[in-house]
Image: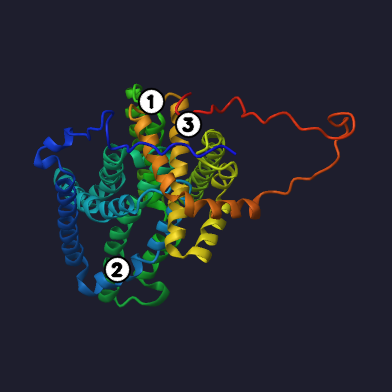
Amino acid sequence: MASSPPYPTHPGRHPGGHSGGARRHAHWWQRPWVRYGALITLLALSGLVILALVREQTGTEGFLVGLGLAVLPVPLLVAAFRWLDRVEPGPWRNLLFAFAWGACAAALMAIVANSFATRWIATETADPSSADTLGATVIAPVVEESAKAAAVLLVFLFRRRDFTGILDGVVIAGVTATGFAFTENILYLGTAFGTDQLTGGSGIASVTAATFFVRIVMSPFAHPLFTVLTGIGFGVAALSPDRQRVRRVLFPLAGLLLAMGMHALWNGSSTLGEYGFFAVYAAFMVPAFGVLTWLVVWTRQRELRTVRAELPAYAVAGWLTPAEPFALGSMRARRVARQYARRHGGKAVARAVAQYEAYATSLAFLRHRGRLGRAGTDFVTRERELLLELWHRREAARPALEHAVRVTAPPVPVAAPPWAPYGVHGYGHPPQARPHPAYRANPYRF
């Protein structure tokens, strides 16, 4: 068995023992806590303003009813996107930011811009009905998808290490759109409840019930479906080398345009007659949802294959045990490892195993990008950081992963070979095992 590799040098120090001093002289506005404080303040102010605007339009009672109904699909949608991100789960702070941006900042921008544009069109055309139609089919898709795309852009620019592929774009875009739909549903459901209060509508025939059925039951995935197209564009850009700047700009723009187009088609379905909504729903929305679901599941399976293909290089070098690449490349084995760790070591050990799985997956993706020439200039530093994180958690993770391999590995049939055995009087020693030529002993070289 290979001996343990030497303990890696700390990634925060440069050769020669001097820690990075460039950040010590950063201006006060460049410090992380200043940026975080400004962002939190912006989102909080946006939330307060949007709360006041929605409550003004729906009334207190309508707001509470809309809030209670609009929250119902949120846990399911967030859980679905978190499930898609299980291979390399991103930090929760990114999801919290995405949801808060969609529910507060994007919703505020959409309400203000849509109201202003609709009033301007009504003033110019002197036809309020056409202004509402034009605002819903042209102005709203452009404004809303641009506002939601801003969250994806911010994570792409400032959380680049957490944004490495298509699934990351899908998850950030989907959670942002879930937050936006949450606020929008409060407004629509609260307004519908107010209408029922004035007209005396109740039961199945009420406006609230119809709005709930259309927005919560039939199409809770509508806004996430639109914005996911933008996220896919950013995900493809994340997979592109830094030198391909045109591609890194065109793909997000193409995704944004597709999102706007599908959003416009969805909003315009109400102008296609009595059954226009159902026709668009059946002919476009359901097939698009199916295709995108297949795409993200296929991408997830592809990521697992990447893990199984890249990690053996680190097993040959002694950083991982030979069984770990298989366990880390199987979602079932990962789950079994976490369950074993929780049962025998408690929540802290299970958390360490989950972190070990996430860091090992990031390491596999990093090596994959490096082999394809897509890694950044900080490849070696990032690799050492990830290896250091694995080193700290190896004692907790390895027993659980080895147990998972024993439980989930398929049985290997053993049978006598049809050819002659080694030696004359029996089986001799097989040739010394050598690593596959696709993997080098030194994981730092390609």
Q: What label sits on residue 67 in the rendered view? A: 2
Residue type at mark 3: give it: His
Residue 318 visible in the shown view: yes
Q: Is residue 337 left or right of residue 113?
A: right
Residue at x 29% of width, y 64% of height = 186
Residue 299: percent from left, percent from top: 51, 40
Give the residue type at disc 1: Pro
Q: Viewer-nearest of labels 2 and 1?
A: 1
Instruction: Judge left or right: residue 257 versus residue 17.
Output: right
Regarding residue 220, the answer to whether it shows in the image is no
Q: Quadrant of the N terminus?
A: top right
Find disc 3 in the rendering and name its residue: 368
Q: Secondary structure at mark 2?
A: helix
Left/right placement of residue 193 relative to residue 344 reads left
Percent position (x, y) of residue 50? 19, 59
> In this orientation, which residue lies closer to the viewer: 238 or 275?
238
Disc 1 is placed on an element classified as: loop
For marks 2 and 1 on the same chain, the one whose residue lies earlier in the sequence? 2
Tell me the mark number nearer the camera, choosing from 1 and 3.
Answer: 3
Kindly identify which numbered label has been placed on residue 241. Answer: 1
Question: Which residue type carries mark 2?
Answer: Leu
- The reply, left or right, for residue 8 in relation to residue 322 is left
Whether 348 is drawn above or below 209: the answer is above
